[in-house]
Amino acid sequence: DAFEKELVGTLAYQGHVLVVDGLLDAAGGRTTDFGTVLDVGCGTGLCGEIWAKRGCTSRLVGVDLAQRMLELAESKGVYDELHCGDIVEYMDGKIDDASVDAVLSADVFIYIGDIGDVLKSCARVLKPGGRLSFTVEALKDGGEVRLLPCGRFGHSSSYIRELAARCGFEVQVERSVDALRHQGGVPVKGGLFVLRKA
């Protein structure tokens, strides 16, 4: 697919690798018996593909707004289920409380801005001890969350930490990322977070 080749090849996109490896590191390197893992904003299935390449075992469920992206994700053969819809509406309408072991979200929050509702929904569906692994674009000059000139949102560490605490998460991993991807030949700085539900 041209979109995926552009993203991973030309733009040197790394979000999917960071999110999966961040979760595995937080879980002590364990790759088996993850139970149910939800990939929110799964797109073409890049996270699912890395998940499978790392030898991870789980019931892997993907959700995305774009049906065409889901068709590409399905072609990878790594998801047990794929659903088309808004990630918060899907979680709130289709997933029971404390029924998910982990949530992956690579470069999704950069299109949402205020991620309060997403984190609340993730906290509700995750089992105690469950983890949420995600990437964000960094704010260079302070603030909490702001629309950047590129049309994506940047989130500050303090914003994420405060929101995580309000939603019942502890920050297990916070890592600065020098290049989530490249845009116009310039690295896009970001961050990886892994939150653990108390």
Image (cartoon, rainbow, N blue to C red):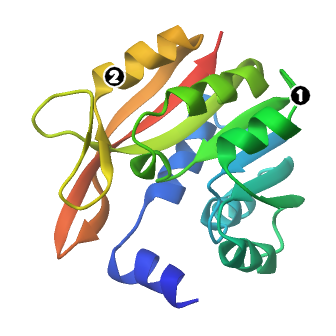
Name which of mark 1 and mark 2 comes first in the sequence: 1
- Residue shown at the point (63%, 40%) measured from the top left: 24
Image coordinates of residue 45 in percent, x first then y, are 67, 67
Q: Amino acid at mark 1?
A: Asp
* Viewer-closest of 163 and 39: 163
Q: In this rendering, is residue 190 above or below 170? A: below
> Where does label 2 land, which residue?
159
Q: Is residue 7 visible?
A: yes
- Residue shown at the point (61%, 20%) measured from the top left: 196
Q: Is residue 33 visible?
A: no
User: Would residue 161 appear left or right of 75 to someone viewing this image?
Assistant: left
> Where does label 1 land, which residue?
96
Q: Quadrant of the C terminus?
A: top right
Image coordinates of residue 132 in percent, x first then y, are 61, 32
Q: Quadrant of the N terminus?
A: bottom right
Tell me the distance, in whole angstroms, between the alpha carbons under discs 1 and 2. Answer: 27 Å
Answer with the quarter of the image where residue 91 lies. Answer: top right
Q: Amino acid at mark 2?
A: Tyr
Label ID, residue 171: none
Q: In this rendering, is residue 28 above or below 2? A: above
Specify few, some or many for label 2: CA neighbours under 10 Å numbering under 14, 14-19, or 20 or more: some
- Residue shown at the point (52%, 31%) measured from the top left: 194
Answer with the quarter of the image where residue 179 lies. Answer: bottom left
Q: In this rendering, is residue 197 above or below 56? A: above
Q: How many marks?
A: 2
Image coordinates of residue 153 in percent, x first then y, are 32, 47
Image coordinates of residue 128 in percent, x first then y, are 76, 14
* Viewer-closest of 100 and 179: 100
